[in-house]
Image (cartoon, rainbow, N blue to C red):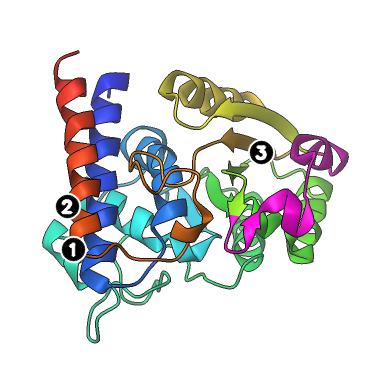
Amino acid sequence: MTNLELQKMANEVRKDIVTAVHSAKSGHPGGSLSAADVFTYLYFEEMNIDPKDPKKPDRDRFVLSKGHTAPGLYSALAERGFFPKEDLTTLRQIGSHLQGHPCMQHTPGLDMSSGSLGQGISAAVGMALSAKVFGDSYRVYTLLGDGELQEGEVWEASMFASAKKLDNLCVIVDNNNLQIDGTIDEVNSPYPIDEKFKAFGFHVINVNGHDFDELRAAFAEAKTVKGQPTVIIMKTVKGKGVSFMENNAAWHGSAPNDEQYAVAMADLEKVGEALCQK
């Protein structure tokens, strides 16, 4: 896809996120919106996947380590054709396959259930190690929140990934600088994130997480790295695309009411209209 096509799709993913969380009257829109561009790039450009064959053996694997941003992942999966978009309005409802955190037993296209922060990257490391042991060609991607880096398990997994030279592993950090209690540096600063990962033996790439040129170049570079895992640290805006949600920690885990939903969708419609004029 061209960058413009990716931008348009990411905007649709953002609409889906807001719609799903509004329908559920609960959920996590802020971090889903900040990661919408990378979800879009992964599922429409980067990963070897097939919605018609979600379990094909050579598929690339993705683990959502920051599992609370499931609305973002579900929206990308729906847009990619893994299940009907209409399902998004059943988010978090009893009987729905779209639970508040990803559950691989119920949702097509999911490679790992996740939710407890820190655990997703460990699962991804295990998948990457398995590919090395059995000589499989697939790559493994995992998305972490920046507040999630406060979990010790993240660094245990990172140390192991480096020790085992897992160059088929690509860790992505959504650095929107906000978590549920405020800014990450006020709560428990993980900065400097890039230097920490370098110290743990990672190849480090810093990007603007809303720039598809930079994302494209970063993922291409990651594929050339040999003998060490890669981390792509994305600088992003929490709540990206919705005026009253941007850079506002209050929208980490809150759902918009009907009035707010109308404003949010109007914001995103304006973005879509501007993209159509390019």
Determine contact: label 3, label 1, CB under 8 Å: no
In this view, 102 is above or below 32: below
Kind of residue at badge 2: Ala
Q: Which label sits on residue 181?
A: none
Q: CA distance from mark 2 to mark 3?
A: 37 Å
* Mark 2, residue position: 262
Mark before the other along the chain sequence, 2 or 3: 3
Q: Position of residue 130 (x, y in %)?
A: 62, 58
* Mark 3, residue position: 231
Q: Could you say which quadrant of the image residue 1 lies in?
A: top left
Determine contact: label 2, label 1, CB under 8 Å: yes
At x 36% / y 77%, what residue is drawn? Answer: 105
Q: Position of residue 101 (x, y in %)?
A: 43, 71
Q: Which residues are magenta?
A: 179-201
Near-viewer residue (144 or 164): 144
At x 19% / y 58%, what residue is drawn? Answer: 259
Q: Which label sits on residue 258?
A: 1
Question: How would you rate the neighbour count of disc 2 (Cα within 10 Å): few for under 14, some for 14-19, many for 20 or more?
Answer: few
In this view, 136 is above or below 187: above
Question: How would you rate the neighbour count of disc 1 (Cα within 10 Å): few for under 14, some for 14-19, many for 20 or more?
Answer: few
Kind of residue at badge 3: Val
Q: Position of residue 272 (x, y in %)?
A: 19, 30
Q: How many marks?
A: 3
